[in-house]
Structures are given as structure tokens and as C-alpha cells.
């Protein structure tokens, strides 16, 4: 509106730009992109290639799909000098720009001023994304990763990093290459069965003790009861349902190895919780009751990743997001409690007590989500109908 095109191109250089392509072509040429078809404005004007910013994208459909490019990449890969660059054509903020070699040199200059990659930003879709209600709550369960990756936390119509990149993400990180594999992963996350059952067992013992005795559980008591429970469970597994006849000799070595492993796990958990308290993730007298939040938060994101990769449709993704939100509300009482549980699960899986990026990334995201006035965690009640 000011006519400040230097500022406009600075903003454009920091944005993902989305271009439509045929899904059949994309599936036949994995890893490649297609700069077609050309866009003709209803008004007389030059032939253009249309790119959209992420807030102006249509809802995902089976076809076409979109790929992403940055302004610097377009400067290097632009196919023809006589085709113009159209940004958000057909919208109130459309813009049309020539794309000669000289103009692309200016694009490259603006792109060089940007710092990459963008991380640790709270980004909200103000129009077209839910801000309140059950869907928004379910989306906010995945907000830690959204803030870390600087993606729109409330974009239910998810295009993410583009069709090819979303498929590559699922293949590289999850081994998912089909709708059936995506469906199994989503269901496993929603059942909170993706994370280790040993974590659930050990944390469950402490939660039971806290409930039964109504206070803080001493670590020594927790260790003692856990060891006793594991040995008792091993003894039960060595008898028939009538509780008398031995079905196999009990492997004491294996049982004691499990006990030792549980003791090490308790040590890891208590050290993480100590760090969480020092960093403000946990109140002084609080502890993590379960790590189901790690599965539910990832389920919220998996629904959107599946949509971006076209392994599901929008309705199916929304149902999964709603379910992730409902399950989270059944297990936790606040966003802070949910966050600490999610981060503990992530650290137990990845961090190996290094307190490195796997922890630091989520700590930064947690602080943004618990302090930024625009955060969904400050504007959507965790508990509700």
C-alpha cells in the first residue's frame, strides 16, 4: 500500500512460495518440480507463473499439488525471461513483476539479505485458520513443533513444505510411503503406543503412589516399588492362570536386567525434571505424570503431514486433530503440564541427557508459547467440553 517495493521483496524473500503442479506428474517424477502452467490475468497483461504465499493457498485437494521455492531459488531456476512472476494472483494483494535477468539479480540480492532457516517463531493464520474451539485446541497440541519450525500452528488445510517435501519427511523420519502406513502410524500415536511402554510403566507407578499417598513421592520409595513390581510381574509370567503350576523357569538374570534398566530410567527422569524446574518448565513441586503428550502432539502434526502428502483428505485429518485434542484433555490439566510431558518424551527418545538441541529447541518453543500474547496456549483454555 505504501509502494515500498524494497520492503515488499524483503518480506517475499523470507516467505515460502507455492506453485501448483499436476499430481500425476509429481508422482511420475519424484524429486522434480514443474514450472507450469502459465497464468493469464483476466486483464490484458503478460504471461506469468503464479506463486502463492502460505496464507493465500486453497484447501488441499487431490489435484493439483504444490511445491515450495524461495525467491533466491526462483532467481536461479526461472525458466523463461518473457514470463512474469505473479504473486497471489486473483487476490486483493496480487502483484505482477517482470523476470528478466536484471530483475532476477534484484531478487537474488533480497534473498541474500535473509537469514535461513527461519526458526522459533509463532506464526498464526488470522484468516482461514481456527483460533478458538476444539479444532484449534487439537492443532495447538502440535504447536511446539510448529513454533520450532516457524510454520502456521493453526493451518488445518496443511500444505507444509510442499507435496514432495512432505512425502520425503514422512519417508525419512517415519518410514511412511503409503496411505496404509500413514494410517497405522496415526492410529498408533492416538493410542499413545508409539513411545516406550517402559516409560509408561515407570511413570505410572509414581503417579499411582502420588495418588494413593497424596503428596510428593520420594525417589527412593519410587525406586523400591518399581523394582518390586517388576519382580512380581516376572513371577506372574512364570505361572499358569491358576497361579500354581510353573510354565517355565523364571529367568532371574533377565528380570534383574529389567530392574537395573528401570532404575537407570528413574535416574534419567529425575535429572530431566530437575533441569525442567530450573528452566521453568515444571513448578517446584510438580512432576511429569505420563509422556502420552509426546504421542498426542505428534498425532496432531501427523494428521497434517498426512494431508500435505495426500495420504488422507481434509476431513480425515481434522477428525484426527480433534481426537488428539480430546485425548490430551483427558490426560492433562494445563498446557504447561502437557508441554513438560511432551518434552520429556522427546528427550527420553532423542537427547541422551546431553541437554542439546533436542531439549533446547523445545524449551525455546515452550517459552514462546507460554509468554507471547498471541499464543494459542494463552488464548485457548486447555480444559473444556
Image (cartoon, rainbow, N blue to C red):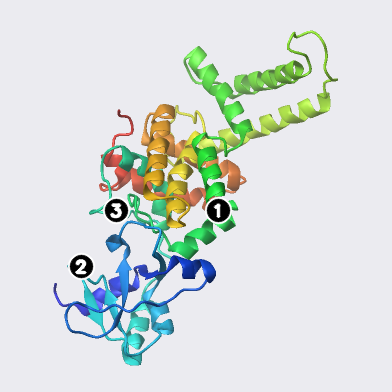
> Circles 2 and 1: CB distance less than 8 Å?
no
Instruction: Count the numbered circles shown.
Output: 3
x then y, percent, for residue 111 = 37, 77
Q: Which of 335 and 32 is in front in this view?
A: 32
Q: Residue at x 26, y 70 (%)?
A: 88
* Residue 351 visible in this rendered orientation of the protein: no
Task: Report which residue position mark 1 lands on.
Answer: 178
Q: Is residue 68 left or right of residue 372?
A: right
Mark 2–mark 3 distance (CA, rounded to whole Å)? 19 Å
- According to the picture, the residue beneath numbered tag 3 turns out to be 124
Does residue 6 appear left or right of residue 285 in this picture? left
Secondary structure under tag 1 reads loop
Q: Position of residue 130 (x, y in %)?
A: 27, 46
The residue lying at 52 percent from left, 22 percent from top is 207
Q: Residue 314 location in percent, x, y? A: 37, 49
Q: For the view shown, which residue lies furthest in the front direction? A: 24
Which is closer to the viewer, label 1 or label 3? 1
Measure the C-alpha gap from mark 1 to mark 3: 30 Å
Task: Find residue 156 and name its label.
Answer: none
Frontmost of labels 2 and 3 is 2
Q: Which residue is drawn at 73% across and 16% down?
A: 236
> Label 2 vs label 1: CA separation?
35 Å
Crowd rating for badge 3 (residues with CA inside 10 Å; few <14, some 14–19, many 20+): many
Label 1 neighbourhood size at 10 Å, few (<14), some (14-19), many (20+)?
A: some
Which sits in the foreground, 334 or 192? 192
Disc number for residue 91: 2
Res 117 seen here? yes
The kind of secondary structure element at disc 2 is: loop
Q: From the image, which quarter does the C terminus lie in?
A: top left
| x and y, in percent, of residue 77 in the image | 43, 82
Which residue lies at the image location 58% right of the left edge and 38% below the top edge? 195
Amino acid at each position: 500500500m505504501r509502494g515500498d517495493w524494497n520492503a515488499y521483496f524483503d518480506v517475499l524473500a523470507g516467505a515460502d512460495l507455492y506453485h501448483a503442479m499436476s499430481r500425476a506428474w509429481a508422482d511420475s517424477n519424484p524429486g522434480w518440480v514443474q514450472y507450469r502452467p502459465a497464468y493469464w490475468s483476466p486483464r490484458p497483461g503478460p504471461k506469468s507463473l503464479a506463486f502463492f504465499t502460505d496464507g493465500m493457498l486453497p484447501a488441499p485437494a487431490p489435484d493439483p499439488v504444490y511445491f515450495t521455492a524461495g525467491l533466491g531459488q526462483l532467481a536461479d531456476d526461472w525458466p523463461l525471461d518473457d514470463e512474469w512472476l505473479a504473486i497471489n494472483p486473483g487476490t486483493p494483494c496480487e502483484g505482477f513483476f517482470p523476470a528478466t535477468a536484471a530483475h532476477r539479480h534484484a531478487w537474488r540480492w533480497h534473498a541474500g539479505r535473509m537469514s535461513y532457516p527461519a526458526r522459533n517463531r509463532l506464526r498464526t493464520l488470522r484468516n482461514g485458520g481456527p483460533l478458538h474451539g476444539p479444532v484449534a485446541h487439537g492443532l495447538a497440541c502440535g504447536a511446539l513443533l510448529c513454533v520450532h519450525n516457524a510454520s502456521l500452528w493453526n493451518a488445518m488445510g496443511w500444505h507444509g513444505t510442499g507435496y514432495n517435501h512432505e512425502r520425503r519427511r514422512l519417508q525419512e523420519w517415519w518410514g511412511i510411503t503409503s496411505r496404509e502406513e500413514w494410517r497405522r502410524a496415526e492410529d498408533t500415536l492416538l493410542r499413545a503406543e508409539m513411545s516406550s511402554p517402559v516409560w509408561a510403566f515407570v511413570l505410572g507407578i509414581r503417579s499411582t503412589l502420588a495418588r494413593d499417598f497424596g503428596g510428593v513421592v520420594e525417589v527412593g520409595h519410587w525406586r523400591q516399588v518399581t523394582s518390586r513390581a517388576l519382580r512380581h510381574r516376572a513371577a506372574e509370567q512364570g505361572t499358569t492362570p491358576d497361579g500354581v503350576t510353573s510354565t517355565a523357569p523364571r529367568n532371574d538374570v533377565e528380570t534383574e536386567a529389567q530392574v537395573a534398566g528401570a532404575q537407570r530410567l528413574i535416574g534419567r527422569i529425575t535429572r530431566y525434571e530437575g533441569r525442567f524446574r530450573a528452566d521453568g518448565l515444571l513448578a517446584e513441586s510438580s512432576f511429569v505424570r505420563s509422556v502420552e503428550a509426546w504421542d498426542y502432539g505428534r498425532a496432531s502434526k501427523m494428521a497434517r503431514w498426512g494431508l500435505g502428502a495426500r495420504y488422507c483428505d481434509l476431513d480425515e485429518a481434522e477428525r484426527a486433530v480433534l481426537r488428539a485434542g480430546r485425548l490430551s484433555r483427558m490426560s492433562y490439566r494445563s498446557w504447561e503440564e502437557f508441554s513438560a510431558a511432551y518434552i520429556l518424551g522427546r528427550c527420553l527418545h532423542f537427547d541422551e541427557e546431553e541437554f542439546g538441541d533436542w531439549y533446547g529447541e523445545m524449551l525455546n518453543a515452550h517459552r514462546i508459547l507460554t509468554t507471547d500474547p498471541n499464543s494459542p496456549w494463552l488464548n485457548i483454555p486447555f480444559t473444556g467440553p
